[in-house]
Amino acid sequence: MDRVLSYLRSLKDPMKLIQLLMIIGGLGVAYTLLAAVQKPSELRRSEDEPVYVVGEMESFERTFPPQGLPSLKLEGPDGPVNLTGYADGRPLVVNLWATWCAPCIEELPSLAALQEQLGDEVRVLAVAQEGGDGSRQRAMLERVGAEDLELLLDPRLSYGRSVSDELSLPITILYDSRGREVGRVTKPADWASPEAVRLVRAVGQGALPR
């Protein structure tokens, strides 16, 4: 303790103080250089640790903790349906859209292409945030070549408002094979892109996107 006190008193000497500051500065520079050397190695990932949230899926937002499908009544082609009934052991891609939403219309063909490309590996739902008898929505799907998508109507906007206060469309939500929400994209995206296909397949295999 006496040695510490003696050293602190010696700092009144300007030369001693300068030496101390030089030592502290040198340590800071060494730390910065070490961090710079280590950073690239931390960014490198092995082939068995792929990154899925890139490219067209860069805006994918993870949901933590995962949440189950909401128990909501929507309008199907044959009458009311409960959304929970669509959890059938496959990844579920739910797209919230509307006929008045231009970005939504632009996105729909890529969702249809995703369904066509993955077939039984995935189920894609187009949930229109609108009412009516569905004829207007089906006509729009046919117009853009997405008529094979499963169409549901949400006339009360119950689904949309359960996931977004502002309900800014389009919103696409990805559920895993157990019906738990893994994450979502709240802007238009190309769901037929290689990144989207890899992401959906990874979720189907139980991987957590990152």
Image: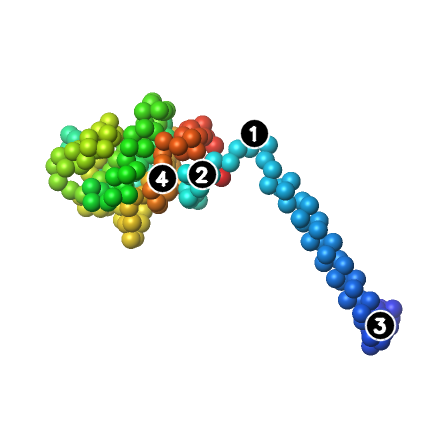
User: Which of the 4 quarters of the picture holds residue 105?
Assistant: top left
The reply to whether the C-beta atoms of the residues labelled 2 and 3 are less than 8 Å apart is no
Q: How many marks?
A: 4
Q: Residue at x 67, y 44 (%)?
A: 38
Instruction: Identify the residue position indicated by label 3 in the image.
Output: 15
Q: Residue at x 28, y 39 (%)?
A: 106
Q: Residue at x 59, y 32 (%)?
A: 46
Label 4 to label 3: alpha-carbon separation: 63 Å
Q: Residue at x 28, y 35 (%)?
A: 108
Left/right of residue 94 with respect to residue 79 in the rendered view = right
Q: In what quadrant of the picture does the N terminus appear?
A: bottom right
Q: Position of residue 148 (x, y in %)?
A: 24, 27
Q: Residues within 10 Å of mark 2 (few under 14, many from 20)?
A: some
Q: Secondary structure at mark 2?
A: helix
Instruction: Identify the residue position indicated by label 4 in the image.
Output: 189
Q: Position of residue 34 (x, y in %)?
A: 71, 49
Marks 2 and 4, the one that precedes in the sequence: 2
Q: Which mark is residue 48?
A: 1
Q: Nearer the viewer, mark 1 or mark 3?
A: 3
Marks 4 and 1, the one that precedes in the sequence: 1
Q: Residues within 10 Å of mark 4 (few under 14, many from 20)?
A: many
User: Which of the 4 quarters of the picture holds residue 90?
Assistant: top left
Q: Which mark is residue 55?
A: 2
Q: Is residue 101 visible?
A: yes
Label 2 to label 3: alpha-carbon separation: 56 Å
Q: Position of residue 180 (x, y in %)?
A: 38, 37
